[in-house]
Amino acid sequence: MNRHELKALTKKELSLLARDAEIAGRSTMTKAQLVEALAEPDTKDIDAVLPDSVEAEVVSEGLGISIPGISHEDRAEAKARREALAARLAAFVDTDTHCPWTSTEGHPCGLPVVMGTETCGLHGDGSIADRAIPLTGVLGFGSWPTLWRHLSLATYDIDSFGLDPVVAEMAWHVMNGLYYDYFRVGSKG
């Protein structure tokens, strides 16, 4: 189905289609998000944006749509560098043990604990070193729902300079995408 046909459906009908397509997170999606998740790629839109000399093709291995001027090898290299960084940073947290902290309203923290401690980076001793690692133990936009929950509950303190660790981590995910995919920063020699 194309976007126009999907927009004509109700949210309940879209939810049923999303269930059949096994789309993760469908229960929390808005109607517009369900339409985007279910819509087939529209090559007319891509062709209108890209020059005729550039073919718009879906790249294998989950690297997305080809971007003019960026080779598939560059995208694969950026993905490998991101995964290596994520593996190094994940070693700082114990994803099997969760922070036991609960708010006065009874909301559990649920974040993984920092290695060698009993609490997460938000509810620990307030060391800046604990806040320089991913709070969720992973990099990427998949951790944003958890971070957004903590941001909305505001169950932690910011440091004396006004740095909000949750907002800083959310910005970190955006900067990683720019660093690895858009600017393709690297060093030689």
Image (tube, rainbow, N blue to C red):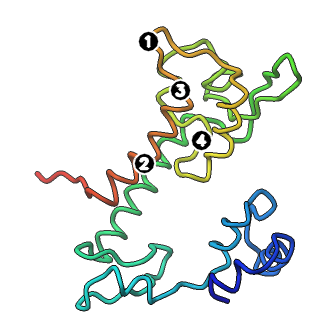
Assign a secondary structure to mark 4.
Answer: loop
In contact (CB < 8 Å): disc 3 and disc 2: no
Q: Nearer the viewer, mark 4 or mark 3?
A: 3
Q: Earlier in the sequence, mark 4 or mark 3?
A: 4
Q: Pick whichever of labels 3 and 2 is earlier in the sequence.
A: 2
Please tell me whether residue 126 is drawn above or below residue 172 in the rendered image.
above
From the image, tell me which residue sits under label 4: 137
User: How far apart, in angstroms, are the residues tagged by discs 4 and 1?
Assistant: 24 Å
Secondary element at tag 3: helix
Query: Which circle marks residue 58 in the picture?
Result: none
Which of disc 2 and disc 1 is earlier in sequence? 2
Q: Which residue is mark 2?
A: 85
Residue that numbered label 1 is attached to: 161
User: What is the CA distance from the residue labelled 3 to the residue labelled 2?
Assistant: 19 Å
Which label sits on residue 165? 3
What's the residue type where badge 4 is placed?
Answer: Gly
Q: Mark 4 packing: few (<14 Cα in 10 Å), some, or many (20+)?
A: many
Lower sequence index among marks 2 and 4: 2
